[in-house]
Amino acid sequence: MMEYLRNALVAGLLSLCLVWIGGAQAFAEDTPEAVVVSTTNNVLQILRKERDTFKDQPAHLFDVVEKYVLPHIDFAQMSRLVLGKYWNQATDDQQARFTEQFRSLLVRTYANALLRYVDANVEVLPSREPARPGRQLVRTEVKLNDDKPLSIDYSMFQVDGAWKIYDVKIDGVSLVVNYRASFKNEISNAGIEKLILKIKDKNEAATSG
């Protein structure tokens, strides 16, 4: 399940960078859909222009992800949802360190696989009416080669007037729910501090490698 989740994360966040440009004019400014489309114009241009550079120096992808993708994700909210009941049981310091390490985990997973999906086609689908004011589900479809299209849904909400992602669903499977289930077992067995240190060790090992 975690391997599926990692692949789902790459495909899901990918559509922030590879959305179908043909629908760009259909979306009003400052809407959730416009956030997805505007991110495309920046990242896709960079990826295609500097593809060979990124292959030789993959660490540079982190800079692109940091600059163009991360501002549209609310990692604090995502971390709270992932930890669930354990969020309030954690100290302020643990909450901050978990958010930092969880953010690094997702960024590293995404950036390292991004170039494999640079030629994917992604289409933004018409949005449905939001269930609550200030909330929106942005639906997309991702297709690579002749594979069956993958449905990607972004749960977004407004933070200080800006639209942010706090969950991604791939074919109905929630990133938040899956990580919550995995981390729940880790916390139950060893505690939240051990979980934070384990994620930190994995991040550092991947960076040094």
Image (cartoon, rainbow, N blue to C red):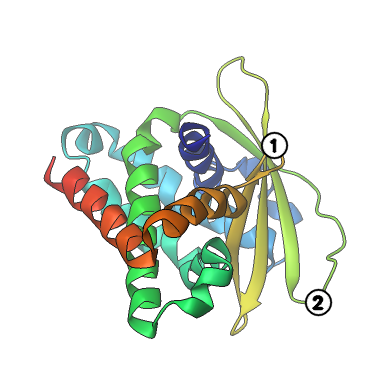
Q: Looking at the rendering, which quadrant does residue 110 occupy?
A: top left
> Helix or strand or loop: what does disc 2 sit on?
loop
Q: Residue at x 66, y 71 (%)?
A: 157
Position of 59 compared to 172: left or right? left
* Residue that carries the numbered disc 2 in the rendered image: 133
Q: Residue at x 61, y 52 (%)?
A: 177
* Residue that carries the numbered disc 1 in the rendered image: 171
> Helix or strand or loop: what does disc 1 sit on?
loop
Report whether residue 41 is seen.
no
Between label 2 and label 1, give the one nearer the viewer: 1
- Outermost front residue: 189
Q: Closer to the camera, 160 or 186? A: 186
Which amino acid, mark 1?
Asp
**What separation in Å lies between label 2 and label 1 (alpha carbons)?**
25 Å
Do the CB atoms of the residues marked 2 and 1 lie less than 8 Å apart?
no
Q: Residue 172: where, in percent of width, then height?
A: 72, 41
